[in-house]
Image: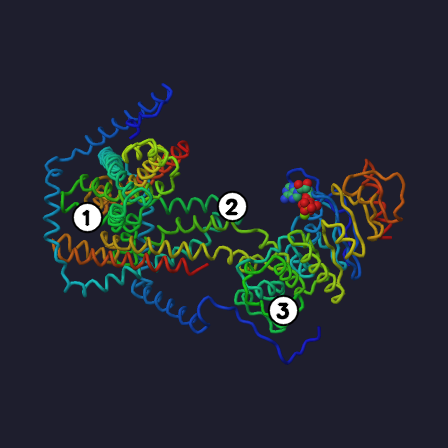
Amino acid sequence: MLSVTDLQKTYPSGDEALKGVSIDVTGSETVAMIGPSGAGKSTFIRCVNRLTEPSGGSVELDGVEVTALSSDDLREARRDMGMIFQEYNLVERLTVMENVLSGRLGYVSTWQAFRRNFPPEDVERAYEVLDRVGLADHENNRADELSGGQRQRVGIARAILQRPKILLVDEPTSSLDPETSKAVMDLLTEIAAEDDIPVLINIHEVDLAQEYAERIVGLRDGELVFEGTPDDLDETAKGQIYRGEEIPDVTTGAQQSATTDGDATEGATEEGEIRRG
Amino acid sequence: MTDYRTWERRTPRQRLVRFTLGLLTIVVAVVAWTLLDVNYSYLTSSPEEFMDLFNRMYPPNMTYSGEILSPLIETVHIAVLGTALAIVLSVPVALLGAANTTPNRASFLLGKFIISASRSVNVIIWALVFVIIFGSGALAGVLAIGLRSIGFCSKLIAEAIEEIDPGQVEAVKATGANSLESAIYAIMPQIKPAIVGVSTYRWDINVRSSTIIGFVGAGGIGVELNTAINTFQWQNVLTILIAILALVVFSEVVSAYLRRKVR
Amino acid sequence: MATEQTERREWTRPTAFYNHYVKWTVYLVITVFLLWSAWNMRISLDRMLQGWDAAVELLVGMFPPEFTPFKTDLLIEGMVESLAMSVIATIVGVIISIPIAFMAAENIAPRPIYWLGRGIITVSRAFHELIVAIILVKAVGIGPLAGVLALSYKTIGFFAKLLAEEIEDIDTGQMEATEATGANSIQTLLFGVVPQVMPRIVGLTIYRWDINIRHSTIVGIVGAGGIGATLLNAFDQYDYDFFMTIILAIIAVVMIGELVSTYVRGRIQ
Ligand SMILES: Nc1ncnc2c1ncn2[C@@H]1O[C@H](COP(=O)(O)OP(=O)(O)OP(=O)(O)O)[C@@H](O)[C@H]1O
Ligand SMILES: [Mg+2]
């Protein structure tokens, strides 16, 4: 289980991208994080595995406080977090197989890695995962020969091969067409269900979020302004997330933090504490 | 150079600047020419001398071609080893000299310093230095070629490193890979084409350089050429020149082929 | 996902060569060639140790650099001669190069002339400047004239090639417009082509001057004038202190030349 408490990030440029966000992701649930551009979604995901160093707050994964780890231990912790990127971030000039196997780099020695000498069970599993994501027989293609949808599948395969305890997904579909987007989302949620791992997913498309997620959190200006089921996400809630409209009364359920004015932070934090309790 | 282009309408100020620059060029040229103190009789007799020289060279001495085979091979050896040495040393220097991989400001400056120091000394001067240190022979040549090439190679490789896509490196790091592993998996593949391109290109240049370092005793065909010229064996000189030409064309073709081969 | 432990698939990285045997053969050949090359260098521990001592001696001898009035005069004299050579060679070379560049530009030169232009460029580029210089020394005698001729000759291949490429990239519309006014072909060149490439001519001239400064400092090693001759003298007389002083001076001049050239070319753009 992932539990994030009061996560803050201020970039050296002075941008306060996260102003204290707290979220728990448990079991094998799919949590979608929505919010307007610049809300801090990517920053949040990247702070969880510390690709971006958070400036405050804590991240805990299955009892390990990720934010307190030394760089050696952080590498070990990262093996448990599979990350999937908007721009796929495959190593373009390597083969599909090498990209997928790079999900095991945290487990093999540097010399083995250099020689592409992965344990046989890893190779076998890589074949299976490639099968699973629909890329059988593509193992020897170079990543730059694939289409966008295929690349994202390789990205998913790479993350899955880590046998992660959670999948962190940053806008997996915004470089893809609607059909491919759905296919990728189907794949992600199915795999998460099969492997029984939770998924935290940043997403622009609200309808995709509502279709696939079990829980939705809304981020605005680095603050958590919504939390609820897909059904809770009505027009008022959307207006609040995307346009910063105030809601006079709590109408969409107990789990919602409702304001964006001065004491919003306080409200959100209280809500967070209640939720965790 | 610029003074006779007065066909375009310009403001008086522009015209004045151009006129001054033109005048300056002429003055510098005249002063330079006077300083050189060239003996005009040499100048007027030079076409004659040149024809004479050519007549003495032609026809090339074919029987000599067997003898220059081994110095030609040595020339290639020097170029290959020198380039290999340069590439091996260039990768770490490039990592220092690239803004995104250098550990700190001091290491960055060190990288830049090595690059510019290597480039600002001509290969023949490097050769002289190494002949002093290791005595005459091909070893001095290899080191001269190698050190001269480090700057060139590191500079281009550093530029390639600065252009890599950081996303690919991040993705590999995010799987829990250590820095060396991410370098092998995410940085190397991205700079490999640059390394191959730079080394074949530099090898081509180095073949040319290897033909002349023999003038100062640093091995290769240049030793032969120097001896032939100093002993006035002009037909041998032409034979060597033809051989050098063939070698240079050969290396250019090979280098172009290799660069095309690596995508 | 139940795994059959018995039938594991294997994977080996596909190779850029035809198959793995070819790949290993190629690697083997390269390794053997490198070892053979290294063997020919006759590297021995003894030689390395001696070399180390010599290097230390050389470095220690460098400080302080030699600046006796006599040596300083030699240094300045040689350096001034080098610079003068670079100036004259650049001017002569560029003047000869410009018509050749027009000859070698595919878009304006008729076929036979184009090939002639390309031919001249290729011949000029074929040999290293020191080879050209050493032969010219025999033709016109020891001294800066040989150096100037050698550098001018090498300038042609460089300058005409780059300028020809520049001319090939010009906007032919302007050229045709000039032609349409009834201008003859020389006028077309002057009014339709030259204005477009003029800034490049100036830029390339300065760039080549920078290169010629570098070369003018070394052609003296084969007797073609300039500081190189002073350098070789110091080398021959085992005067390594002065030798190193000259090298430092050359580095300084070359670096200044490069800085100035980069600055001026930046300003022109
Ligand atoms: N490397 C950085 N340096 C400085 N500021 C940054 C950096 N990355 C992000 N920011 C700032 O942090 C804020 C949040 O950015 P972030 O990328 O997390 O938003 P996002 O919700 O992912 O937006 P999008 O939907 O456009 O991807 C923005 O104001 C952005 O300008
Ligand atoms: Mg984002």
Q: Amino acid at mark 2?
A: Ala
User: What chain does mark 1 sit on?
Assistant: C
Q: Are marks 1 and 2 in contact (CB under 8 Å)?
A: no
Comparing labels 1 and 3, the label whose residue is closer to the camera: 3
Quarter of the image for residue A163 reads: bottom right
Taking depth in this image into account, of A198 and B81 the one nearest to the observer is A198
Determine which residue is flagged by label 2: B99
Asked if marks 2 and 3 fall on the same chain, the answer is: no
Determine which residue is flagged by label 1: C134
The local crowd at label 3, few if under 14, some if 14 to 19, many if 20 or more residues have their Cα within 10 Å, is many
- Can the viewer see residue A54 in this picture? no
Determine which residue is flagged by label 3: A126
User: What chain does mark 3 sit on?
Assistant: A
- Label 1, label 3: how many angstroms apart (C-alpha)? 64 Å
- Decide if ligand 1 comes within 8 Å of the CB at mark 2: no
The local crowd at label 2, few if under 14, some if 14 to 19, many if 20 or more residues have their Cα within 10 Å, is some
Give the image location of residue B171, x and y in percent.
61, 56
The quadrant of the image that shows the N terminus of chain B is top left
- Can the viewer see residue B56 in this picture? yes
Q: Amino acid at mark 1?
A: Ile
